Image: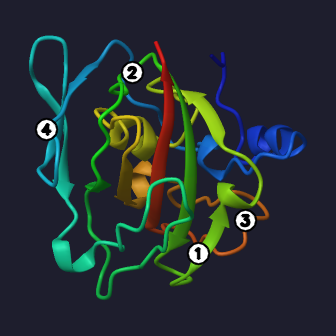
Amino acid sequence: MFHRRVRPWSLAAALAATGALALAACSSSPSSPQGSAATSRGGHGATTSTAPGGGALLAVSPVPTADQSPAGTFGTPPTVTVPPGPPPKSLESADLISGSGAEAVPGDKVRVQYVLATYSSGKVIQSSWTSQPFSFTLGEGQVIPGWDKGLVGMRVGGRRELIIPPNLGYGATPPQGAQGIAANDTLVFVVDLLSVQK
């Protein structure tokens, strides 16, 4: 979509003007390789992204059951829990609620609600539930790499928790003006998938 990388929060500022909280839309990290395909296993198992030839690009580990946020109820704001102890070094994912609708794959336009907490603050710092849902095209680098990789395979009506390490989030340079995101911070998102447009 972009010919050059957008600086952190510049896209968020544009979307905020329309009332959307768009922290997830900002990316200062490289996006996933173009032309990749993805496969996933549902439930609490690991998800693996694969290249067209079948070589693994990224393994997504399950969030340990003891570290998962409460499932809550789809369509209502979730409670996000930052797990105790040191943050994981790789992307972790858990389907808190398994959806039964259309599956999100790269190239789909998806519409979501999300809540973000950080390891550095230990609390929620952003929520789309206070304004409006957020839409983007999955796998095109419009969001941080942890979203492009971690939301693949999710189904409409589902709620997924993602714990995103710095290399798939904002790295050493957090978005300017972002309260609650430290350099090399680990991000904890709980995302509801509202719709998928093929």
Please report contact status of discs 4 and 3: CB closer than 8 Å, yes or no: no
Circle 3 crowding by C-alpha within 10 Å: few under 14, some 14–19, many from 20: few
Looking at the image, is mark 1 or mark 4 earlier in the sequence?
A: 4
Q: Secondary structure at mark 4?
A: loop
Q: Give the residue at mark 1.
A: 124
Per the rendering, the mark at residue 114 is none
Q: Dot 1, crowdedness within 10 Å: few (<14), some or many (≥20)?
A: some
Location of the N terminus (image quadrant): top right
Give the percent coordinates (x, y) of residue 90.
25, 57
Residue ID for mark 2: 106
Could you give the CA–CA distance between mark 4 and mark 3, rounded to whole angstroms? 34 Å
Q: Earlier in the sequence, mark 2 or mark 3?
A: 2
First reached walking from the N terminus: tag 4 or tag 2: 4
Q: CA distance from mark 2 to mark 3?
A: 28 Å
Q: Nearer the viewer, residue 197 or 32?
A: 197
| Amino acid type, mark 2 | Pro
* For discs 2 and 3, the disc positioned in front in the rendered view: 2
The picture places residue 155, in percent across and down from the top left corner, at 34, 35
Task: Tell me the colour scheme of the image.
Answer: rainbow
Residue mark closest to the camera, 4 vs 3:
4
Identity of the amino acid at label 1?
A: Val
